[in-house]
Image: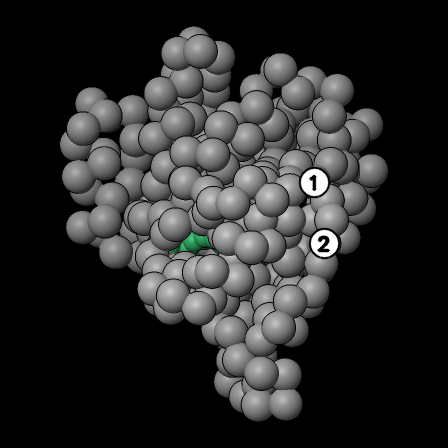
Amino acid sequence: MDQLLDGKTALVTGAGRGLGKAIAEALCGAGARVIAVARTASDLDAMAAERDGRIEPWVEDVTSDDFIARIERLQALDILVNNAGSNRPEPFVEVSDENLDFLIDLNIRSMFRTARAAARVMVRQKSGVIIHMSSQMGHVGSPRRTVYCMTKHAIEGLTKAMAVELAPMGVRVNSVAPTFIETPMTKPMLDNAEFREFVHRMIPMGRTGQPEDVANAVLYLASPLSGMVTGHSLLVDGGWTAQ
Ligand code: NAD
């Protein structure tokens, strides 16, 4: 396993904490050189220091033009994990325009622009793998999640259309669709005992996931083990959407 991605360069967005951090560490553990992107330098420094120069921190906002231009200047890029995203759950009739714009901008527009910049490098080198962080909410609906579900369904559409168009150019595109995983994003939700109980009831396996569950799915899609897989959404949901 520790040589699965030897010689590969990967870029992971939102790598300062939560799923992105676990993914960056897993890809690095499999031999890749990892560009870890986050807005807060201190979140990246400790991880980079532990990994002996194999993690290169980029302090960037994924919605900025500078970040997009920096990707396009890369000489080589083998793996993109388009992970940075957020959620602001609220009842549909109370969704503010501010929250609507924020989530569309981060969860759709910036994911699209990041993927396009990475694909420009990959098409040039005629190889690459792109993994979008979707959600089980890209497959089903749930209360107080209209905007989030809409953005993640958009990512599923983007994944399929990119996969079809880029396959002849040697680029595979897939998504990972997790259920509720214990991260800083979901902590405020899962700290509510009633909500946690609802989540456990909805997951046939009866528990929330850990960041490593998602990192392992990303590792598979990033590696040659999934060489014939493109346009797929890999659910890591303990059975939530199977019902
Ligand atoms: P998180 O909030 O714990 O971490 C997200 C990371 O992205 C943070 O480091 C944050 O700083 C970074 N980020 C946010 N906006 C950014 C920006 N503009 N520029 C650069 N970095 C930015 O979230 P998480 O739970 O780790 O979620 C990561 C991804 O996984 C998101 O796309 C989320 O929708 C998806 N997801 C999470 C879960 C879950 O249960 N945790 C489930 C399904 C999907």
Residue pictured at 17% horizontal, 39% vertical: 46
Q: Residue at x 47, y 45 (%)?
A: 207
Residue 45 picture quarter: top left
Looking at the rendering, which quadrant does residue 204 occupy? Answer: top right
From the viewer's perspective, tell me whether residue 148 is left or right of residue 56: right
Considering depth in this image, is 166 or 47 the residue closer to the camera?
47
On the picture, is 93 further left or further right than 9?
A: right
| Residue hosting label 2 | 139
Query: Callout 2, which amino acid?
Result: His
Which badge, 2 or 1, is on the more N-terminal residue? 2
SS class, disc 1:
strand
Residue 106 x, y percent position in the rendering: 52, 64
- Element assignment for label 2: loop
Residue nearer the viewer, 51 or 218: 218
Task: Determine which residue is flagged by label 1.
Answer: 233
User: Does the rendering let one see residue 14?
Assistant: no
Q: CA distance from mark 2 to mark 1?
A: 9 Å
Q: Residue 187, relative to residue 88: is it above or below? A: above
Between 10 and 100, the one lying in front of the other is: 100
- In the rendered image, which quarter is residue 100 located in? bottom right
Residue 49 visible (yes or no): yes
Q: Circle 1: is it few (<14), some (14-19), or many (20+) Cα within 10 Å?
A: many
Callout 1 amino acid: Ser
Image x and y of residue 128, in percent:
62, 27
Q: Position of residue 102 (x, y in %)?
A: 51, 75
Q: Quadrant of the N terminus?
A: top left
State yes or no: Cβ of the residue under disc 2 lies below 8 Å from any atom of ligand 1.
no
Q: Are marks 2 and 1 in contact (CB under 8 Å)?
A: yes
Q: Position of residue 217 (x, y in %)?
A: 55, 31
Name the residue rendered at 69%, 29% in the picture.
171
